[in-house]
Amino acid sequence: MRTAEDSRPLTFRRLDARGASSRLAGAAVPLAAVVLLVAAACSAPGAQHAGADAPFITASETIIGRASWDGRLAVLTSAPALVTIDPAARRTERVQVRGASRDVLELWGLGESGGKLYSISRFADLVRIDPDGRATVVTRLSRPFANLFDTEGGMAGQFAHDEAGRPLAWTVAADGALSPMNGPPRAPFSLSNAEAGVAHLLSCSTPPRVTCWLPGSAQPLSLTGDVLRAGPPLEGLTAAMATWVASGSAPQVIHDAIADEGRGLLVLHRGPGASDAQAVTLFDRDGRVSLTRAVPERLRMLVSISPTSVLAVGTSGMLVEVRL
Amino acid sequence: MKKLLFVLIAGAALNAVPAPALAGCTDELAACFYEVAQRDSFMERWTGGLDCELDYIECARRKILGR
């Protein structure tokens, strides 16, 4: 949980262009300059706040994990940086993630348990990420983990390698304890161990109402408790073989999804044809299309949904609103 | 002979034609397997092979799952 004490000495507020120009246009320039100098001296290093009109994820960064956290959406990037998004306030905050030691590297995935955020380092270590970006190894996992994601009850992850017929995912406790999740098992792919591992990697939305999907799949899985259940195939979307996606022969079909309690599932997906276009489609509980909308710019991920719109992160690194 | 066998097994594991999206990952995997195959002891080749596979997953998951 983020406390007031956490943010007190480390934060500064980014001024938007209009606000800055109006302040600097008057006779208060010297005073403003002094205030800005003092603020800059007191703030670094620390969190950066930004409104919806400023990029908070750069084009060179990859989003490598996300979790529901303290009423907000926490996003881990490859920088590595921890970005928190408050959808209601359209406000973001970004801190650089730094290891307490050099061992904390190559992070992947993000989960929340007991109000704290966790990731996996180098396939082996469960790492806690504090609100100020400090990352600390909590424990070494019993086997190499290739994935970690957030669930309503805590966290879940996936082994880098495992045999066909074994569980697809495992719940992961904050102390590293594992227990198998119920649901479809690993499939017997005719692939190398490495490619089979990639073909089984789940992408998941964040709580509440977690939805997951396998590479190339057009049939989402709902995650309730520790049970993954296959939902209906989504109308109009053509699945690609997971083996094709894992070997790079086919692109992902579902780019992101977010469940809407009353209406079904909103899916960001590959557009029709071979183009790079995307669309968002609302599917009802039976997988039938309720509505489809084009997106104003290519989207990286969905953030939240309201009755009239969906909030997303665009490739510009800023929040984008798509009207439904 | 063991080294040759390892290279052949590694080659068989990579029988899929590298597609453009993951060609970099697959090339790195092939280079990694080749380098590991030159090592002297079986244990070094075995653990090195596992590291190669993890490197491939690291590369491929960014391209497939990363946003």
Image (cartoon, coloured by chain):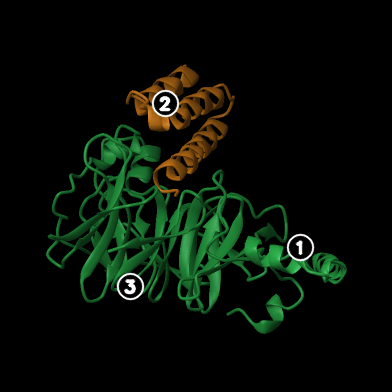
Q: CA distance from mark 2 to mark 1?
A: 46 Å
Judge by depth and name the residue closer to the eye, B63 or A146.
B63
Pointers 2 and 1 in contact (C-beta within 8 Å): no
Residue picked out by circle 3: A306
**Chain on which label 1 sits:** A
Q: Are marks 2 and 1 on the same chain?
A: no
Residue picked out by circle 2: B10
Q: Write down which chain is painted green.
A: A
The amino acid on which the numbered mark 2 sits, given as a three-letter code, is Ala
Tell me: A114 left or right of B22. Answer: right
Residue found at x 48% / y 78%: A71
Question: Where A280 falls versus B30 (above or below)?
Answer: below
Residue A168: quarter of image:
bottom left
Residue picked out by circle 1: A45
Q: CA distance from mark 3 to mark 1?
A: 35 Å
Residue found at x 63% / y 51%: A105
Q: Write down which chain is painted orange.
A: B
* Circle 2 Cα neighbour tier, 10 Å, few/some/many (<14 / 14–19 / ≥20): some
Residue found at x 15% / y 68%: A285
